[in-house]
Image: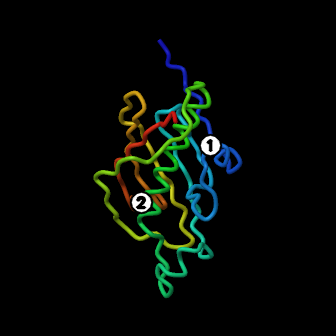
Amino acid sequence: MSETARELGSADIQKVLELLPHRYPFLMIDRIIEIDGDESCIGIKNVTVNEPQFTGHFPNMPVFPGVLLIEGMAQTAGAICCRHIMESNVQTKQVFFMTIDKCKFRKPVVPGDQVRFHMKKTNNRKTMWWFHGEARVDGVLVAEADIGAMLVTA
């Protein structure tokens, strides 16, 4: 018996803007690749020195804030939740970031880096979805966390 390869999807910036309500300066992903249904995907963030957070974090040695790495993970996971909603005609209006657990920051991210947010769904029950996320730069783990999202109907 042979296994059929799953077709992996992707979302360019225009599709990301359709999926998420976030806009500049709070949109933390530029593209999503390797979307495997609602099971996993990889979001990409190209970090540039002209982003507003670098004027204060830190001016003489710019470091991308860890909280924004976690937000990038949440947005990547939220995008595949929204994609699932659109494809399933589920009566949901929003996806909200609800929990964060086991968060660890391993290495600083600086301008010029490309961060890849590897998100894998670990569970879902009714309107709650949980993901494990890893942020990687050049294949090196820079941050990780378990996050939860809630699909809201009102």
User: Would you name the residue on which mark 1 appears?
Assistant: 19
Residue 58 is left or right of residue 20, and the answer is left
Precedes in sequence: disc 1 or disc 2:
1
- Provide residue 44's location: percent of width, then percent of height: 56, 54
The amino acid sitting under disc 2 is Val
Is 135 above or below relative to 3?
A: below
53 vs 87: above or below:
below
> Which residue of the protein is positioned furthest toward the bottom in this rendering?
60
Camera-side residue of 69 and 6: 69
Helix, strand or loop at label 2? It is strand
Give the crowd class for mark 1: few <14, some 14-19, many >=20 residues within 10 Å. many
At label 1, which amino acid type do we have?
Answer: Leu
Residue lying farthest to the right in this orientation:
14
Residue that carries the numbered disc 2 in the rendered image:
140
Extreme residue in the front direction: 154
Q: Position of residue 124 (x, y in %)?
A: 38, 31
How dense is the environment of label 2, judged by Cα within 10 Å: few (below 14), some, or many (20 and up)?
few
Residue lying at the far top of the rendered structure: 1
| Residue at 56% across, 37% down | 93
Kindly identify which numbered label has been placed on residue 32: none
